Image (cartoon, rainbow, N blue to C red):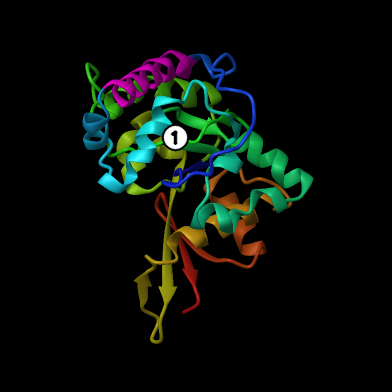
Amino acid sequence: MLLPPSESKAAPEAGPTLSLADRPDELRATTELVLDALIDVCDSDPARARRLLKLSPGQADLVTLNARLRQAPTAPAWKIYNGVLYDALDFGSLTTRGRRRGRSDVLVASGLFGLVGLSERIPAYRLSASAGPLPGMAPLRELWSAPLTSYISRLAPSIILDLRSSAYVSLWPIPESLTKRTVTVKIWQGVPGGERTAVSHHNKAYKGRLLRSLLEADRLPRSPTGLVAELDRAGWTVALEGSRLDVIVEP
């Protein structure tokens, strides 16, 4: 299950500093490269860093935050990412089984880490998918393409539920070798007369609740049809349209 990160992040007050020793082999080297380049530009040229990160003058504190990533305290990623989707998921209140599934089956897309597990310890940082290329480096999409494809291919998931936002889909488009086992999600609102309108404002909240339902389901689905069956049992109104799961919510 692939999630987008939150733009805002909760900075822990205490905790061990960042260690990449336990990162997946496929992702460790690229994480080191991106981390070093991000720290360097934020420390040596804050004005340039702010432009690359597409931050406003009032967000200069995020440049300072990035410059200290090696010294910053860390916490499990589920405590770092916040915002509407993560509030709706409410990972900390899941059952023991739900949390175990989340730690093993949910990955969060990240410009800095590529993909990060919910239990991985990370600091608060700012490097969104839309950031410009870091000095002396290729765009993030090019840097992460091969490592992420190699990593996910090794995991060999029977199904990929892609809940990422468009920016993070662009950061790592699902490769052709994995498209047949990938399901994307579209949230619709039912309206009188049987028509549907796309949900925008509450889209993230519904995706968080949807993921919560799956983590608490009797069994994790291993196929698109199994996904539909589990969500139907959980009370969701869903329909599979090719590789897209349509989720219909009440107005």
SS label for mark 1: loop
Q: Is residue 115 left or right of residue 197?
A: right
Three-letter residue code for mark 1: Tyr
Question: Magenta segment, which residues?
Answer: 26-44
Residue at image x 58%, y 29%?
Answer: 73
Q: Is residue 7 left or right of residue 103?
A: left
In this view, 199 is above or below 218: below
Image quadrant where residue 62 sits: top left
- Would residue 20 be counted in the magenta stretch? no
In this view, 97 is above or below 250: above
- Would residue 32 be counted in the magenta stretch? yes
Instruction: Confirm whether residue 132 shows in the render.
Output: no
Magenta: main secondary structure equals helix
In this view, 26 is above or below 168: above
- In-front residue for pair 241/219: 219
- In-front residue for pair 156/98: 98
Give coordinates of residue 234: x percent, y percent. 66, 63
According to the picture, the residue beneath numbered tag 1 turns out to be 125
Instruction: Confirm whether residue 7 shows in the render.
Output: yes
Give coordinates of residue 91: x percent, y percent. 65, 49
In this view, 176 is above or below 183: above
| Residue sitting at the far right | 96
Residue at image x 51%, y 62%?
Answer: 206
